[in-house]
Image (cartoon, rainbow, N blue to C red):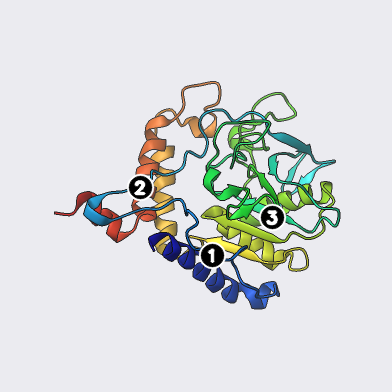
Amino acid sequence: MRTLAIRRVLTRTAQTHARTAAAAAQVPLQSAALRPIVPGQPQVGRRSFCAGAVEDSEPTYASGDLSGYKVFDHDGPFELSTGAVLPELHIAYETWGNLNAEKNNAILLQCGMSASSHACSNAGNPTKGWWEDYIGPGKALDTRVFYVICTNNLGGCYGTTGPSSFHPDGRRWGSRFPRFEVYDQVAAQFKLLDHLEIQKVHACVGSSLGGMQSVCAAARFPDRVGKFISISACAKSFPGSMAFRHAQRSAIMNDPNWNNGDYYERKLPEAGLRLAREIGTITYRSGKEWQGRFGQ
């Protein structure tokens, strides 16, 4: 019963986001679930707050073996929404399933801030990915039906162009890397879709930052997105969220090893990153989970 309830919550969440952005996105409001709930089918990612227990740990987004991805090299400079221009753009991506002849069964899986493109194991990399339990035959993103594509985000530094990439002058971009927006990350993903000759995706699916990208994709490219699912995300951050993010950035920038963002080839600002993650975790968990962990 718990697993079916979780599935229904995800469905209701996606429908709520769809109604919120539908007017701007002009995306048909079909059922947000990509497939119906199947009674008795195992559902994953469960968390139980009974007796203070947390059954599953958070997925590992960017550790272990990150090899085996493909790289799309964009032909020419890539202009950002801020007006800055990247002289070159490389996008790391991985795929699962098969693209049909009509090229209309693609799902663009949009990941969180710290995730790589390795959402699931594949022939190029058999290591389990961060959404392993949701991608595959008979799973939520059913690879018997859909062609699933996941990229490493612009600025993500796991194969896609970002601050750790090399500038044309031979040094790392570091602090010189220009500011960019969620829209730029989405625009880069659609450059990849152009390369794959996919005019319209069946759906955009994302959680956290990826959920923001899904909303953005539907609003910016309404003719190219059939539907979208946005999980644990929003269309706009509220002031309290911005305040927490400022505190997180301050924690990193006050680490002695920050070096104004040019810490590549040097010791990483690990203490600041750890503190920033701790601050962020306060905002990621529910009251029930905190009660289960620390309640007296």
Which residue in the protein does label 3 denote? 107
Q: Amino acid at mark 1?
A: Ile
Quarter of the rendering containing residue 117: top right
Quarter of the rendering containing residue 73: top right
What residue is rendered at 40% in x and 57% in y? 243
Alpha carbon separation for disc pair 2 and 3: 33 Å
Alpha carbon separation for disc pair 2 and 1: 36 Å
What residue is rendered at 33% in x and 58% in y? 286
Label 2 CA crowd tier, 10 Å (few <14, some 14–19, many 20+)? some
Q: Is residue 13 above or below residue 117?
A: below
Label 3 CA crowd tier, 10 Å (few <14, some 14–19, many 20+)? many
Q: Is residue 202 above or below residue 139?
A: below
Quarter of the rendering containing residue 165: top right
Of mark 2 and mark 3, the one earlier in the sequence is 3
Which residue in the protein does label 1 denote? 37
The spot of residue 252 in percent (x, y) is: 42, 38
Of mark 1 and mark 3, the one earlier in the sequence is 1
Of mark 2 and mark 1, the one earlier in the sequence is 1
Q: Amino acid at mark 3?
A: Ile
Which residue in the protein does label 2 denote? 279
Work out whether residue 179 or residue 60 is closer to the camera in this orientation and state it. 60
